[in-house]
Image (cartoon, rainbow, N blue to C red):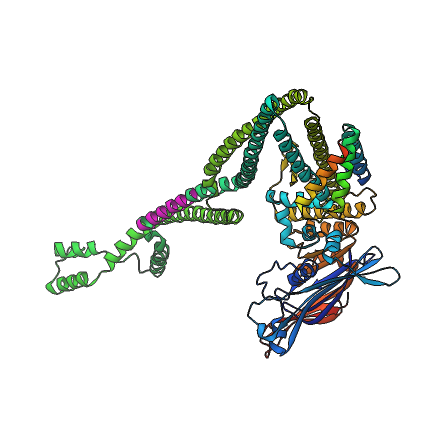
Amino acid sequence: MILHELKITNFRQITGVQRFTFAPPGDQPITLILGENGAGKTTLLHACLWCLYGTKDFEHPEQLASYRSLSENKGDVCVSVKLVFYRGSKRFTALRECTFKASDLGSGKSQPFEFTLHETNEIGETRPCPDPELVIQQLLPRELAGFFFFRGEDLEQLVARSGADRLKTAVEEFIDLTVVDNAINHLKKVGKEIEDDLRSSVKGRAKDLSDKIESLEQEIETIEHNCAKFSEEAEKASVQKEDIERELGRTQELQPFITKKKELTEEIDRVTDRIDGFRQQLKQKLSRDGYLAANPQLLAKIEAITKEAVEAGQLPARIKPQFVDDLVGTGRCICGRELGPEENAQLSAWRNGSKLAGIETAIFQVKSSLTSYRNRSTEFDLECKILREMLDESIAERTRLLSERSRNDGRLEGEKGLDNNVGHFQKLLKDTNERLQELSFELGRRDEKIAKASNEIAELRRVREKELKAEDRVELLSRQERSVKNVRDALVRTRESWVGLVQEYLDGQLKSNWSKMAQLERLVRFDEKFTLSIHERGGQGEWVKSAPSAANQRTLALGFVSSLIRLAAEAKDSTNAMGLFSGGDYPLVMDAPFATMDEHFKRTVPAGLLEMVPQLVLISSFDQWEGQIKESLEKKIGKAYVLELHGPEVETKQVKLGKTMVAYKLHEPDAVYDWTEVKEVEA
Amino acid sequence: MNEVSWKDVEEGRKQKLSEIIQELNEEEYELLRLVLTFENENRHNRHVFQAVQNIRDMVKRVIK
C-alpha cells in the first residue's frame, strides 16, 4: 500500500474540499504536514482510518461533519474522505461518504455512510470491488492499521507489558492464522460430536470406560480453565512486579541525590550554627570593647591638642597649682616675705578660676594611657577582622551549599516522598513475589495433573478399543475420533511453530533496526511472550533492564513497526504465504513521533527510519519540526503542506518556510467556528 | 546479531510442517488437507454449525 492522494471534504474541522498528494517512494519519500495545535493534525489520521474502516475513535464522534459547513449551508453537506493508493501496479480508490443536513448541526445525529472501493489495473481499466471491506482487510487488516497510522504517544503503549496482546495480534494478523484457528476450533467441535456418538453407541464395560474418559476430559478442562485464571493472575502480578521494580529502580537511581540532600542539609545546619556563633562573639566583643572602635580619633585629637599646647609653650603650665596652694597655705612669698591680704585674695581667685592644671593633669593621664588604648584598639580591630572574615567565609559557604542543594532538589523534583516509599515498594514486591511463586507452583502442577489424566485417558481408550473391536460402528467412530484428535494436534503444533518462527524473525529485525536507528549499545528484544524490552550494560558488564524513558520506548516501538514493514515487504513475494494478508510495501503515517526524543535520538532515528520505510508521512507542529529533525529530513521532503487554522479567536501568525512567509493561523472575526484549510507549500 | 531472514522462516516452517505431517497416517493427512482447503475457501463464513457439519462429513468420507 503506497499512498497517492487523500481528498477530505467537510470532515470534522477540515472544511470544504482539501487535497494532499503524497510524495512517492524514492529519493524524497517524505510528505511533511505542518500545523499548530488544534489545526487538525490528528484529524488527518482519523480521516484515513474512517475512510478505510469506518472507525471513529476520536472525541465527539458525533461531530463528523464540519460545523462551519453545516452552519453556512442551507442544503445538504457531503462529508467524504477519498484515499487513493497503490498496491504494486494496481491502483485502489477507497471512498467513504455520508450526507448531513444543516439541521443536524449539534444534534449528534449519525448518518449512514456508503463505502466503495475501485480497482484500476495497469491498462487503466477500473472496476468496483464487490466486497470492498474484504479487499481492504486483505490489503491492510484493521488490527494492523494502528501500526502504520499512529500518533507518537501511541508508540509508548506498545512497549508497555500491557501492549503484548496487541503485538501478538499483530503477529497473528500478519501471518493470518484465521484458517488454522478456525480449523482447530471446528475440529474440536467435530471431535466432541463423535465422542458423544461413541458414548451413546457403547454398552457394558465399554460404556463405563467412556464415562470415565469423559469425566477425565472434564477434569482436564477444569484444570485448564483454572490454570487460565492463574495465568491471567500471574500475568497481572508480573506487570505489577515490573511496575514495583521500576519504582524501586527509580528510587535507587535517585538514592545518591536523596543521600546528597541529607548530607547537604546537615552541612548547611552546621555552617548556620557556626555563623550564629561568630555573630554572637562579634556582638559580645562590640558590647564589651566597642568603644575602642571610636577611641582612635578621640585619642588622636587629644594627642594633637596636647602636642600643639606643648609646642606653643602653654604646657606644661608655668605655675603649678601646688605652688600657689603652698603660697596661700604658708601666707609667705618664696622670698620669705609675708603676703598681704590683697595678694592672698589674688592668689585664691587665680587658683579658683583656673582649671588648666586639672586639664593638664587629665591630659597627661590620658596621654600616658594612649599607648595602652592604641594597643588594645589594634587588638580589637584584629580580632573583629578575623571574626568578620570567618563570618563572611561561613556565609559564602552556606550560600554555596544552599545553591548545591537547590540543584540537587531540581533532580529530585516531582519525586517527593520517594525515599519514604521504598519500604512500601519493598513490601509490595515481597508480597507479589510470594504470590507469583504460589501461582508458578499451581501452574507447574497443571502439566503434571494434565499429563496424568491424559495418560489415564489414553490407557482407557486403548482398553475401550479392545472392547469395541467386536462392533464395527463403534470401532469406526473410535478411529474417527482418534484421527480428528491427531489432525487437530498437528494443526496446534504447526500454529505454535509458525508463530515462534515469526517472533524470532521480528526479534532479529528489531535488533538490526535498533542499531540503525538508535546507534546506542543496547540489547533489545521481542520475546516469546510478545513483549518488547530494552537492556543496557550494568556496572559488571551484565545486561540490565533500562529505566523506562519515552525516547527509548518510542525508538523501540518504531524499530518494531519497521520490522513489521519489512515482514510485510518480504511476505509479499513469498509463494508460501499461508494467510489472507497479502503483504507488500507500506507507508508510515505518523503524528508527532519524535516529540519526546532527546537530541541524540532526534539525529539518529529519523535518518535510520528512512532506510527502512519506503514512504513517510510526517505530521508535526512547527516547533517539533525545527532543529535536529529538520536538519535530518529536510532534503528528503517531496511534498509539504501547512494546515491553515482559521477562527474568530485565532491570532494571525506567519512562519518562514524556505524562502517564503506562510500564514498558518488566520484571525477571522466573522467566523463562528474554527476551521482548517490545507495549503501546499514549497518542499 | 541473530537476524533471521524470511527465507529461514519459510524453510523452518516447511521443515516443521513436514515433521508434523510425517506423524500423520495417509487418511489423517488427507483429512488435514481437506479441512484446510475448506477453511480457506470459507474463511469469512461465520456459520460455525455449517462448518462443523461439513468437516464431520469429510471425516466420514475419509476415515471409513
Image coords of residue A65 (percent x, y): 63, 69
Residue A446 among those drawn in magenta: no
Location of the C terminus of chain A by quadrant is bottom right
Nearest the camera: A375 or B6?
B6
Asked whether the viewer can see residue A270, the reply is yes
- Residue A547 drawn at (x, y percent): 60, 42
As drawn, which residue projects farthest toward the left? A341
The segment highlighted magenta reads A270-287
> Along the line of sight, which residue is nearer the eye, A430 or A21?
A21
Tell me: A377 left or right of B49: left
Q: Could you tell me which residue is drawn at 49 percent across and 32 percent down?
A: A430
Is residue B31 shown above or below A584?
above
Taken as a whole, is the magenta stretch helix, strand or loop? helix
Question: Where residue A445 sits: x, y (%)?
Answer: 56, 26
Q: Can residue A444 be seen in this view?
A: no
The quadrant of the image that shows the N terminus of chain A is: bottom right
The quadrant where residue B27 appears: top right
